[in-house]
Image (cartoon, grey):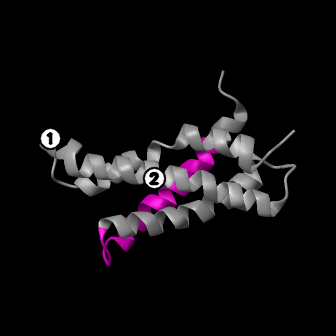
C-alpha cells in the first residue's frame, strides 16, 4: 500500500517539477539546454524544500541546517540522474526513435520524473528525519 506521505510527496514533487519544467523552457530561450536544466532544477529544489517541509514532513526531528544540507545532497544526486536521463534521451534515445521535434522538452520531462523514488527515500531518512 502506498502511504499518504508518499502521495503528498508526489503531489508536492509534481508542483516543484512543474516549476522546474516551466522555468527550463523559459530559461531555454536565453541559454543552452544543459545550463537551463541546472538553473531550473535549482528553482525547483527551493520550491520542493518549502513544500515538503510545510506539507509532507511536518515535524522533522533534525535541525534546519541539517535538513538544508541533506536536501542539497539528495538533490545533487537527483540532478545527476535528471541530467543523465535528459541528455541520453535527447542525444541518443529519441533520435533512435526518429523523434526530433520537441526532443529536448520530451527528454527533460522524463529526466525530471526519474528521481522521484530515490529522492523520497533520501528525504524521508536523511533530510526530514521524523519519528
Q: Is residue 45 above or below residue 96?
A: below
Mark identifier at residue 96:
1
Instruction: State if disc 1 and disc 2 touch (CB < 8 Å).
Output: no
**How many numbered badges does the structure rendering display?**
2
Q: Residue furthest top?
A: 1
Magenta region, mostly helix, strand or loop?
Answer: helix
Q: Which of 124 and 10 is in front in this view?
A: 124
Dot placed on the residue nearer the N-terminal end, 2 or 1 = 2
Q: Does the magenta stretch include residue 35?
A: no
Image point (40%, 48%), residue name: 111
Q: Is mark 1 on a helix, strand or loop?
A: helix
Percent across and percent down for residue 23 are 44, 67
| SS label for mark 2 | helix
On screen, residue 16 above or below 40: above
Query: 71 left or right of 104?
Result: right
Residue 38, percent across and down?
Answer: 44, 65
Highlighted magenta segment, given as a residue range: 9-32
Residue 69 figure quarter: bottom right
Query: Residues under labels 2 and 1: Cα distance?
Result: 23 Å
Q: If the image is split into quadrants, where does the C terminus sit?
A: top right
Taking the spot 62% from the left edge, 55% from the top edge, the residue there is 73
Q: Nearer the viewer, residue 81 or 19?
A: 81
Q: Which residue is drawn at 66% across and 56% down?
A: 71
Residue for badge 2: 80
Residue occupying the point 21% across, 51% down: 91
Mark nearer the viewer, 2 or 1: 2
Q: Quadrant of the N terminus?
A: top right
Q: Residue 61 carries which label?
A: none
Amino acid at each position: 500500500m502506498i502511504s499518504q506521505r508518499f502521495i503528498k510527496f508526489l503531489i508536492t514533487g509534481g508542483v516543484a517539477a512543474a516549476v522546474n519544467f516551466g522555468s527550463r523552457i523559459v530559461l531555454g530561450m536565453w541559454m543552452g539546454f544543459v545550463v537551463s536544466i541546472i538553473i531550473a532544477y535549482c528553482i525547483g529544489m527551493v520550491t520542493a524544500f518549502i513544500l515538503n517541509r510545510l506539507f509532507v514532513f511536518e515535524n522533522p526531528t533534525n535541525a534546519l541546517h541539517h535538513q538544508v544540507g541533506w536536501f542539497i545532497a539528495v538533490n545533487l544526486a537527483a540532478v545527476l540522474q535528471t541530467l543523465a536521463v535528459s541528455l541520453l534521451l535527447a542525444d541518443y534515445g529519441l533520435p533512435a526513435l526518429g523523434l526530433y521535434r520537441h526532443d529536448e522538452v520530451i527528454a527533460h520531462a522524463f529526466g525530471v520524473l526519474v528521481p522521484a523514488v530515490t529522492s523520497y527515500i533520501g528525504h524521508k531518512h536523511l533530510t526530514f528525519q521524523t519519528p
